[in-house]
Amino acid sequence: MRRFEADTLLVATHNRGKLEEIATLLEPYGVTVVGAADKGLSEPEETETTFEGNARIKAHAAARATGLPALADDSGIEIDALDGAPGVFTANWAETETGRDFVMAMGKAHDSLVESGAERPWTARFRCTLVLAWPDGHDEVFPGKVEGQIVWPMRGNQGHGYDPIFMPDGYLETFGEMDRWEKNRISHRADAFAKLVSGCFD
């Protein structure tokens, strides 16, 4: 596994919240974190059918464009009774002509579960795959996940995306009800980040 030796890391995201979260995690290592918007990068089209494939597209495009090591992630929710859907199409389920509507997407997930006739608990997991790519084409891949179940009705207004209908195993609160620091500690992204730090920074 290749160690991260540079002093600057490009994070291939336009999401400021995600950028701040990553910068905080890497603060102890003295790494300067910059985002895609800071470098004027557009978002490449995600044409793969796996989280790893889409994260690779984003990480390598950013590394090639800037000459910096680049980190990208792709994530989503898999619902077992829906054969793993929405999976890599998690965000697509929320697309409307006026932007993303995750309340609509959560309703679609629930309606699909009811139509499937699946009995509760509706087991599910959030997945995140991180890819750290270097300008020479090398990369390292770190998958993370958190297991849980789908609940209905929606609960809580914290977090984002499908958080109000996902209750992680061992908890009675959904991600939408949970303090964000607690959620960030146990999330799929935290799992992947722990592997990244262990593999490339520690």
Image (cartoon, helix red, strand yellow):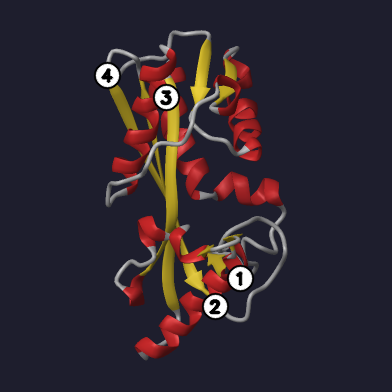
Q: Amino acid at mark 3?
A: Ala
> Splitting the image into 4 quarters, where does residue 60 fall?
top left
Q: CA distance from mark 4 to mark 1?
A: 39 Å
Q: Which residue is mark 1?
A: 103
Label 3, label 1: how many angstroms apart (C-alpha)?
Answer: 31 Å
What is the number of callouts on the image? 4
**Which secondary structure, mark 1?**
helix
Distance from disc 2 to disc 4, alpha carbons, whole Å, reads 41 Å
User: How many angstroms separate mark 2 from mark 1 (CA)?
Assistant: 6 Å
Which circle marks residue 107 in the picture?
2
Residue, disc 4: 137
Label 2, label 3: how far apart the Cα atoms are: 35 Å
Please, is residue 14 above or below residue 162 in the view? above
Q: Secondary structure at mark 3?
A: helix
Tag shown at residue 62: 3
Q: Nearer the viewer, residue 5 or 109?
A: 109
